[in-house]
Image (cartoon, rainbow, N blue to C red):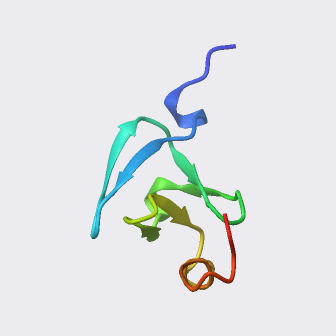
Amino acid sequence: MLMSSADKTAKLYYGPSSFRVLRPGNHVLCAVTGAAIPLAELRYWSADLQEAYASPEIATRRLLGIDRA
């Protein structure tokens, strides 16, 4: 079965205020929980760590060192 880019995990470059798609897909994975995050809903990431997060709470905990990847 052929997979379209809609079925794949995207690879992104995370900048300070935006991200760039390096490999097409429709979602990325949360660095802490592993949950799929649709690109249209991606709001939280770390440009320094090049990681995406599913929620502001998860991002805060990760950046404070409470949750380790």
In this view of the protein, which residue sits in the foreground, 9 or 65?
65
In the image, farthest residue toward the top: 1
Quadrant (top left/top right/bottom left/bottom right) for the N terminus: top right
Left or right of 36: which side holds 25?
Answer: left
Q: Position of residue 4 (x, y in %)?
A: 54, 25
Number of marks in picture: 0
Residue at screen point 69% across, 76% down: 67
Instruction: Determine the residue positioned at 68% across, 83% down.
Output: 66
Residue 62 x, y percent position in the rendering: 60, 77
Q: Residue at x 29, y 61 (%)?
A: 15
Q: Is residue 59 above or below residue 14?
A: below
- Residue 13: give x, y in percent of width and height: 36, 50
Name the quadrant of the C terminus: bottom right
**Residue 2 at x, y = what percent?**
62, 15
Q: Would residue 20 be found to the left or right of residue 7 on screen?
A: left
In the image, is residue 18 above or below residue 13? below
Residue 47 figure quarter: bottom left
Q: Residue at x 49, y 38 (%)?
A: 25
